[in-house]
Image (cartoon, helix red, strand yellow):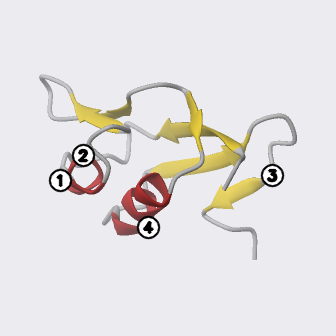
Amino acid sequence: MGDRWHIEVDRSLCIGSGMCAGAAPDGFRLDGARQAHPVGAEAEASEAVLEAAESCPVEAIAIRLVGSGQPVFPPDD
């Protein structure tokens, strides 16, 4: 993909399902309160991280392009 992404988890929405950590274990972790957080605020674009965002049952994960801020997920409609 070649891009860098800024990854955020809205912890007020996160229900701790662990789907993100299962789909992208290098990209997401659950903390002691079973809340997800990205391993790093920025990461190389990856299919696994995108799949994790798409699989979140409450759409708590947002991905934007570093620099431009253009949304990757959820996409602007």
Circle 2: element type: helix
Front in this rendered view, residue 50 or 12: 50
Front in this rendered view, residue 3 or 28: 3
> Residue 6: where, in percent of width, then height?
63, 36
Residue at image location 32% in from the left, 37% down from the top: 26
**Label 4, label 2: how far apart the Cα atoms are:** 12 Å
Does 26 appear above or below 60?
A: above
Select label 1 or label 2 by which is in front: 2
Find disc 1 in the rendering and name its residue.
17
Front in this rendered view, residue 48 or 65: 48
- Disc 3 residue type (three-letter): Gln
Residue at image location 87% in from the left, 42% down from the top: 68
Crowd rating for badge 1 (residues with CA inside 10 Å; few <14, some 14–19, many 20+)? some
Select label 4 or label 1 by which is in front: 4
> Label 4 near label 3: C-beta < 8 Å?
no
Find disc 2 in the rendering and name its residue.
21
**Label 3, label 4: how far apart the Cα atoms are:** 17 Å
Which one is earlier in the sequence, the residue at label 4 or at label 2?
A: 2
Seen in the image, is 70 located left or right of residue 54? right
Find disc 3 in the rendering and name its residue.
70
Select label 3 or label 1 by which is in front: 3
- Disc 2 residue type (three-letter): Ala
> Label 2 near label 4: C-beta < 8 Å?
no
Find disc 4 in the rendering and name its residue.
54
Which one is earlier in the sequence, the residue at label 3 or at label 2?
A: 2
Residue at image location 41% in from the left, 64% down from the top: 51
Crowd rating for badge 2 (residues with CA inside 10 Å; few <14, some 14–19, many 20+)? many
